[in-house]
Image (spheres, rainbow, N blue to C red):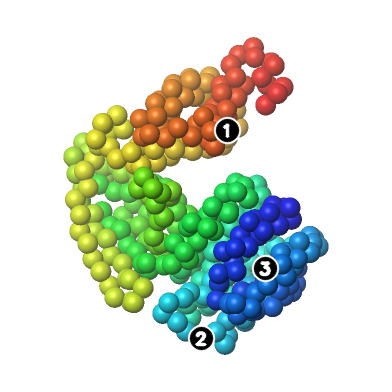
């Protein structure tokens, strides 16, 4: 994890040097590794040297790191043209009285959000503390980011950093106005994973999305699964949705929209939505398979064999070709599961 963090930080140096003020804090007892410096006074080589000297000490004190970082903003001047943000590169796994340390960190971050010092989490490692990520994500102005490589983090910092630290809406409430339809599930944000059927979908904050030269954006989409209140009821062709939010100046807004409901195979579905729905089906199927603990092998073999060509077709139809490049691993996982669950395929069983 130290190697990953060093790679991420070194790839982000140019962007970090553009900050008006910058400090680097170690999570081991919250020690200050690089003091707060003003823009124009941050030596590039000095920062890189400091980054390279970071060590893995085996102690992660989340609340101390949060408290030390937040204290550096005590005398920071308010400005309408800048934002104050704590950026954590971490797995969020405390080694110091874990339960109390996590609770104290969360308390500190919520307190800081009240004075417009917001938090970003860049998840590191496969053992990420998902529960704490969800709790922090629901904090005002918080942003969770996931990156797979140093190159991806460098691109994010160079092109998307300004978007990922600029909050454009707070206290977002999305309500289904149609009487016969309710939420079933939400995807795209930890805050809507456990959405309640008869309650608004609530988001603490939202951010703008960077677009490439083709007008495409990464992320920024949330998918809601709907159902009729009456069992076996007919889904309407459209639903009324009301959205309420506060802008960055505290002014409240409301917008009522009519949303058309279309099937997955409809040619008029937006490409981004088509891809998002395909990924939701992928994640749900893999999660069900993992949670099943191999009790219904034949059922899942048939499901995965039927799903694979549909998944490929939907992504191709959306104009996404990453199954051949950066997301090739998703397809390989499906193939491994199919091979593993195929009766008599002992070679696959021993290699997966």
- Left or right of residue 315, residue 265 in this image: left
Disc 1 crowd rating (10 Å Cα; few below 14, some 14-19, many 20+) is few
Mark 1 lies on residue: 329
- Left or right of residue 268, residue 49 in this image: right
Of labels 3 and 2, the one closer to you: 3
Disc 2 crowd rating (10 Å Cα; few below 14, some 14-19, many 20+) is few
Q: Looking at the picture, does residue 344 appear above or below residue 70?
A: above
Q: Are marks 3 and 2 in contact (CB under 8 Å)?
A: no
Spot occupied by residue 161 in the image (x, y as percentages of width and height): 50, 61
- Residue 197 appearing in the image: yes
Q: Residue at x 39, y 60 (%)?
A: 208
Residue 63 lies in quadrant: bottom right
Q: Which mark is residue 44?
A: 3
- Residue 134 appearing in the image: no
Closer to us: 183 or 24: 24
Spot occupied by residue 101 in the image (x, y as percentages of width and height): 67, 69
Of labels 1 and 2, the one closer to you: 2
Q: Looking at the picture, does residue 84 appear above or below residue 146?
A: below
Does label 3 or label 2 sit earlier along the sequence?
3
Closer to us: 116 or 341: 116
Spot occupied by residue 256 in the image (x, y as percentages of width and height): 20, 59
Q: Residue at x 60, y 49 (%)?
A: 151
Mark 2 lies on residue: 77
Q: Which mark is residue 219?
A: none
């Amino acid at each position: 994890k130290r190697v990953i963090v060093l790679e991420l930080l070194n790839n982000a140096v140019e962007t970090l040097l553009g900050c008006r003020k910058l400090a680097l804090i170690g999570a081991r007892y919250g020690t200050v590794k690089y003091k707060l410096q003003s823009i124009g006074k941050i030596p590039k080589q000095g920062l890189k040297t400091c980054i390279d000297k970071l060590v893995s000490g085996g102690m992660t004190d989340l609340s101390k790191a949060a408290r030390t970082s937040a204290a550096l903003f005590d005398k920071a001047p308010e400005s309408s043209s800048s934002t104050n943000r704590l950026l954590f590169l971490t797995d969020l796994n405390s080694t110091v009285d874990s339960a109390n340390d996590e609770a104290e960190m969360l308390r500190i971050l919520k307190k800081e959000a009240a004075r417009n010092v917001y938090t970003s989490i860049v998840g590191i490692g496969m053992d990420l503390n998902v529960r704490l990520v969800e709790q922090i994500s629901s904090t005002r102005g918080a942003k969770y980011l996931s990156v797979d490589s140093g190159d991806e983090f460098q691109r994010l910092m160079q092109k998307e950093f300004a978007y990922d630290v600029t909050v454009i809406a707070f206290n977002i409430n999305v309500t289904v106005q149609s009487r016969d339809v309710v939420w079933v599930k939400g995807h795209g944000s930890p805050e809507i994973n456990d959405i309640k059927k008869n309650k608004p979908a609530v988001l603490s904050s939202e951010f703008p999305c960077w677009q490439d030269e083709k007008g495409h954006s990464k992320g920024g989409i949330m998918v809601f699964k709907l159902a009729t209140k009456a069992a076996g009821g007919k889904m309407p062709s459209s639903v009324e949705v009301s959205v309420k939010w506060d802008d960055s100046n505290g002014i409240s807004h409301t917008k009522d929209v009519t949303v058309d409901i279309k099937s997955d195979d409809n040619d008029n579905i937006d490409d981004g939505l088509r891809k998002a729905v395909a990924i939701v089906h992928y994640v749900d199927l893999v999660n069900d398979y993992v949670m099943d603990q191999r009790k219904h092998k034949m059922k899942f073999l048939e499901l995965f064999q039927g799903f694979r060509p549909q998944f490929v077709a939907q992504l191709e139809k959306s104009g996404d070709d990453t199954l051949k490049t950066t997301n090739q691993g998703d397809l390989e996982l499906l193939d491994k599961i199919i091979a593993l669950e195929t009766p008599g395929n002992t070679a696959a069983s021993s290699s997966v």
